Image (tube, grey):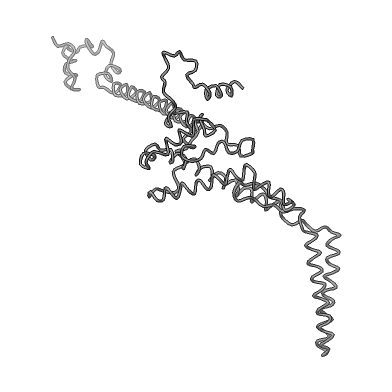
Amino acid sequence: MVDAMRSMLDELMGKERDVPLEKRSGRGVRYYDPEVCKYALAGLCPYGLFKNTKSDLGVCKYELHDDDLKFEELKAEYDALSEKEKDRTGYQKELHVLLTQLVRDMDRKIERQRDRALKESEPKPVSASEQVELDAIKAKEKEALDKSEALAEEGDVDGSILFANTAEGFKTQWDALHASFTQPERTMSVCDVCGVFINSTDNEQRRKDHLEGKQFRGWLAIREKLAEVQAAAAEKGRPKEPDVREHRSDRERDRDRDRDRGRSSRSDRDRERDRDRDRDHSRRDRERRRSRSPVRRHAEVAPPGDLYHGGSGSRHEPRERDREYGQPSRHRR
């Protein structure tokens, strides 16, 4: 209610009604302002076609539409642009993408509805009592055919024809009775334009209401506008089927960003884990190489006293051992 009142005041008094006079910009709304519906400028905004119906598309992301008093002037301003300038705005392409996505979704819905209609229109099974009645007629038909063949072998042509006609009558009776037993209470079809179910039991008034209803007329307008946009695109050498991935809701874009952010976080964690693993390997390798060093190995085998002052050995003995293992002497003065 508050939003409706605010919109009404904006339309009557302008959006700067609460701004002091000395701070007002004094500029009117232009066709390229962000609140003006670009779909309506390009020819059709589908969001206003299905209000209070099952096909309701929700709220358009633009605020100012063709029901606004200013829109006629804005549309005239946009229509006065050259084709090159209109192409530069991208409004027609945006509408092309949106209508293509909507029609694709509706066509997929129609296919699903047709499968459901086919299942609900399947013939009814024959009951046991009905089968007995059909078998009795089938037996009479066979009896008449056998009699016709027997008379034909005896040379009674007229009698054979008479019983053959009788058998044909029983067959017609069987077909009609079988059809009445298996006929479903109703058959269903699907509208090729809006996907609404159409029942065989619908009277003429209901069919007329369907053709004059919001859903049928709205989807017909969308399909006709899409055909017009596709024809214009073909004249300009552009593809008739744009990349509908360009038209995504804000929710879908946010979901994609969150997914990418999650992937990035996982990648960062994986890289950090790999770096920690590499550091652990490098540290173990250094420790392993250090443990295999000749001096360290000799120190582990011989006690310190043997290395420097061991028994009858000389103080120069470590130098000889150092030379033996290619290490510099620690006691060189």
Position in image of residue 223 (x %, y %): 53, 47
Q: Is residue 5 left or right of residue 141?
A: left
Residue 283: quarter of image: top left
Which residue does the image show at 60% across and 37% down from the upper left?
56
Residue 129: quarter of image: bottom right
Position in image of residue 212 (x %, y %): 64, 46
* 317 shown above or below 132: above
Farthest bottom residue in view: 155
Farthest left residue in view: 333
Quarter of the image with the C terminus is top left
* 137 shown above or below 246: below
Q: Nearer the viewer, residue 292 or 22?
A: 22
Q: Is residue 183 left or right of residue 257?
A: right
Q: Nearer the viewer, residue 1 or 128?
A: 1
* 299 shown above or below 64: above
Q: Is residue 160 left or right of residue 244?
A: right
Residue 272: quarter of image: top left
Position in image of residue 136 (x %, y %): 86, 68
Position in image of residue 76 (x %, y %): 44, 36
* 118 shown above or below 30: below
How many marks can you see? 0
Quarter of the image with the N terminus is top right
Q: Nearer the viewer, residue 145 or 113?
A: 113
Which residue does the image show at 61% across and 39% down from the upper left?
55
